[in-house]
Amino acid sequence: MPTLDYGSMLKGVLGEDAGLDPDRLSQDLSERFTKAHADVEARRASEEMGFFQLPDDRALLAATREAADTFGQWFETVVVIGIGGSSLGTATLRESLLGSGWNELDAEAREHYPRLFVLENPDPHSFSGLLSRLDLRRTLFNVVSKSGSTAETMAQFMVVWGLLEEAIGADKVHGHFLFTTSPDSGALRQLASDLGIPTLPIPDNVGGRFSVLSPVGLLPAAVTGIDVEAMLRGAGEMVKRCESATLTENPAGLLATLLHAADTELGAHIHVLMPYADRLRSLALWFQQLWAESLGKGVARSGERVEVGPTPLPAVGATDQHSQVQLFMEGPRDKVLVFVGVENGGDPVHIPTIFPDVGAFSYLGGHSLGELLDAERRATAEALRRGGRPSMTITLDRVDARSVGALFMLFQIATVYGGALYGVNPLDQPGVELGKELTYGLMGRAGYPPPELPSPDPRWRA
Amino acid sequence: MPTLDYGSMLKGVLGEDAGLDPDRLSQDLSERFTKAHADVEARRASEEMGFFQLPDDRALLAATREAADTFGQWFETVVVIGIGGSSLGTATLRESLLGSGWNELDAEAREHYPRLFVLENPDPHSFSGLLSRLDLRRTLFNVVSKSGSTAETMAQFMVVWGLLEEAIGADKVHGHFLFTTSPDSGALRQLASDLGIPTLPIPDNVGGRFSVLSPVGLLPAAVTGIDVEAMLRGAGEMVKRCESATLTENPAGLLATLLHAADTELGAHIHVLMPYADRLRSLALWFQQLWAESLGKGVARSGERVEVGPTPLPAVGATDQHSQVQLFMEGPRDKVLVFVGVENGGDPVHIPTIFPDVGAFSYLGGHSLGELLDAERRATAEALRRGGRPSMTITLDRVDARSVGALFMLFQIATVYGGALYGVNPLDQPGVELGKELTYGLMGRAGYPPPELPSPDPRWRA
């Protein structure tokens, strides 16, 4: 299970002029967290935060497994059509647990599990590129939208439907779709009922960015052979570990409380998530949505106008040591880093002892790539510490279904604590409504008048 | 050629309380830029900024073409081993000009040009995953490191060398390598000379993050059939457009001056680059290194301690409307966005007029995916404008070699203007030295004592 080391957030470890006073962990920070914990427990008890229950929802798992075991037999390729909370979790599951080269493996190397693609952006170039490589007759499209009206998703769904009608005939099209949507409302739900398309539900009290452990992520995981039981077990273990109202015993509480304090007291407004593992790059993108959309709010729950929220910044080690770390080391002190280290990052890759006379790299011989990667992580964390720049480190023993499930839950729980600490509602996203309405107006949706968009002024063009 | 619309940075357009006074474009902002321009011209004249000359370096292009035309015939796959400035440009060229599915196409669809991979991170899992899918006997490894001593790159090079020795015998290994490195110094240059390995030079006055138009990017581009002449022509045209010392005539000057003013005067410390095109996602990552590593500095050129530099944040539209835009719309006013729109984003993908009774998405029928994507971009820019949040928009007519070459040069020139405006040296990266030295110490490199790294304190662990 993941552990969290947070010494490098604290005065003393970081030096005498930087970091948070460790005594506060049993004083005001502890009190602040206890209140946030109580607030979350109350909302959880009123069943607003359904993601806490997903690890124990055996009925949902059984329904997902049944769909996966049926369709998994029939199709060579599964394409998820979804965006944001409907795509980022699936991309994370694929990259962390199947590996980024999954779709390039042949059927035998995939143990005859299907290839898995995600269509998220309505970009004609990438859409056509993917579609041209698919055999539509052997492809299942899993359309994922809780509302059933997400424009980007519905547009791509309609194009695919039309292509399938041409390719296999109107009477067979419905057999290539599975909808993951609201259990009882929305246009996609209605369409499924009219056309006899199988569906999986997203529980009403599970929002998009908290839905990876619902059928949104479970279906693509189960259909590709990921151990979904282990993933849910890891998530359930993390729920248990985060039941404590004592700050220093609750890893999600520490993560949220220390990141919130770093933002509001140390000026560390930018929260960098930097796993040292290529496989976890998309986890950082999943976290980015979760943290940004949940905590970046203009109005507090009290009704007060606030404009708060940290900015999550994804990074990957060691790669970003050659991109962002110069700024992290020497730029403004507006960042806090959360490293993710992996103890067993893969089968060892030994560096041979060759070129003994070349001092610039002969020293690498006899080590392994994993040792180098781990040394880079420790060196970077230490260099930041010496500079008085705060960080934390999450350590996994390995990247597997259980640890990834635990990480998902750790960050989700930290996020709802974060909502309480910032005083905002972590479950809504009112700031994207205006953009949606303007898009509807531009696209001619009934009830949305065409907006007046000022043309770019040629005076301000170069 | 790209155009830059910057009205939404200005008071009036943004509302009366937000943005920069447009009169300043002919007053202090203009004077500030003129000084920066003169500073850059002086460093350019003293030949410190070699990237300006790359579009005109016919000898370098000829040498690269010759290597590409030779090796391009022989190999089915080219793997670039490099990191940071040695990999990000190549990844951008592949994704923007070949398409992200290039390596999944068969040889005919690739017109028999090779597949192109990049090995950047010494991550044993992703390294083994890629190597297991390659036929080593038909693979060329292009090792890219200006210094010839980058630990991550050299470690992977050594592993590959060892694997090739096993696979094809020690006497044939050298024929599978091409080194792109310093023309006259470093361990890689020496090794090439000892072992008879062909090389391409990175000019001494071209730093890693400014090297995409040198053989670092040109070789992978030329070998995969990218029109390198058009790319260099686009870059050269941008050099010309940015010769003017008049702010409003110089797009790189406007970009740098307005982003600098947004950071230092409006509190917009975070600079978001948000192309509305999947193909340009890696351009935003390339820009991230360029902007972060060049401008994030602890010491000014004057010698004064400063700790300055904006934080670049990559995003992709419309995808990130479902991730980061909530924060951009409602969170702290610490961001400025640079959108990239593409007029002709690909062959039109028509949305069929089906499901006429489903109001939630029937309105999409008859449009195209590209229309939707463009409407999303305009709607998001407009929503931000109405909220008084600043942005600029770069518009491309299409994503092709010429426009990508122009974009590379636009951002590179803006970056060196940025250095002058922030008063820092955009060409160095002293902040990564300590981390490198600690890594050397941990890995046992001669001359680097093992560092004392404090163990994580179990008191601060959960």
Image: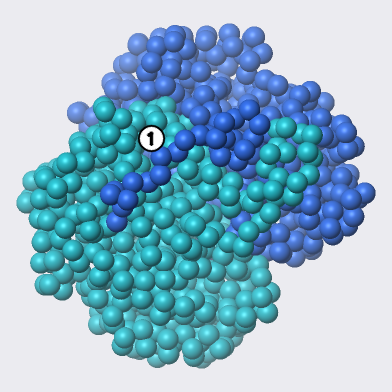
Chain colours: A blue, B cyan
Residue A332: x and y in percent read 24, 39
Badge 1 amino acid: Arg
Q: Is residue A112 visible?
A: no
Residue at figure coordinates x 49%, y 88% from the top left: B69
Horizontal arrangement in the rendering, residue B313 relative to residue B262 (left or right): right
Q: Quadrant of the N terminus of chain A?
A: top right
Residue A196: x and y in percent read 90, 37
Chain of residue at mark 1: B
Residue at figure coordinates x 88%, y 33% from the top left: A194
Circle 1 is placed at which residue position? Answer: B385
SS for dot 1:
helix
Q: Nearer the viewer, residue A136 or B81?
A: A136
Q: Nearer the viewer, residue A65 or A393?
A: A65
Residue B299: x and y in percent read 14, 48
Horizontal arrangement in the rendering, residue A270 relative to residue B355 (left or right): left
Q: Quadrant of residue A167?
A: bottom right
Residue at figure coordinates x 40%, y 73% from the top left: B231
Q: Is residue A200 above or below residue B224?
A: above
